[in-house]
Image (cartoon, rainbow, N blue to C red):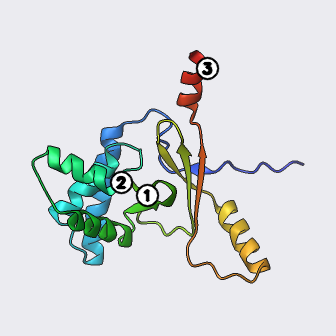
Amino acid sequence: MRTVTPMPKLASNPFKKHQHSQCIRDALHSAEGLCKKNGFRLSNVRKRVLELIWESHQALGAYAILEQLGKEGVKPAPPTVYRALDFLLEAGLVHRINSLNAYIGCNHPKDSHHGSYFLICQHCHIVAEIHDKRIDEEVASLAERERFSISERALEISGTCQHCQETQHAR
């Protein structure tokens, strides 16, 4: 009898159509609850930075956030945005995409996850977060075999999303 291995779970698949406004509301509601539970202060600046990050599933850099805040009439100094990003990272509300030097919202901030695995479209720059216990187990096994102590797990995979593939084929 053949065993079927489940596919990796995309937390909130930005490559497929979904209710994005609901996605943003859920993320902000979750962030507020998590901060309240942990005694963190989600200031207006921190909340707005998180909201800007969630407004698209594209990874967003600090200077893009500064630019958007400037368009809204708010002119914070760069350290203010960096402090907000540091807070959001530490609170587990966002992930840093190292290869892009940018940030995306965490789909499951309440859940502890061993690793962060991301699919990054090289064309539209949308990022999807993957949760897969098999990847966690394989990485742990490889590290153990090499007697390597893991301090952080992040895997960034670049490629082309289905939408961009279809757009390229249509040309």
User: Disc 1 marks which amino acid?
Assistant: Asn
Viewer-nearest residue: 83 or 34: 83
Q: Which residue is at 31% across, 44% downward?
A: 55
Mark 1 surroundings within 10 Å by alpha-carbon count, few (fewer than 14), some (14 through 19), many (20 or more): few
Q: Is residue 51 visible?
A: no
Query: Which quarter of the image is occupied by the C terminus?
Result: top right
> Residue tagged by mark 2?
61
- Distance, label 2 to label 1, CA atoms, is 6 Å
Mark 3 surroundings within 10 Å by alpha-carbon count, few (fewer than 14), some (14 through 19), many (20 or more): few
Mark 2 surroundings within 10 Å by alpha-carbon count, few (fewer than 14), some (14 through 19), many (20 or more): some
Label 1 sits on a secondary structure element that is loop
Estimate the x, y position of residue 83 in percent, counting from the top left: 26, 70
Q: Which residue is at 41% across, 44% downward?
A: 57
> Residue tagged by mark 1?
101
User: Disc 2 marks which amino acid?
Assistant: Gly
Q: Which residue is at 36% across, 50% downward?
A: 60
Of label 2 and label 3, which has the lower sequence position?
A: 2
Of label 2 and label 1, which has the lower sequence position?
A: 2
User: Disc 3 marks which amino acid?
Assistant: His
> Residue tagged by mark 3?
169
Q: Determine which of the numbered discs, if any, sits on residue 66 in the image.
A: none
Viewer-nearest residue: 166 or 111: 166
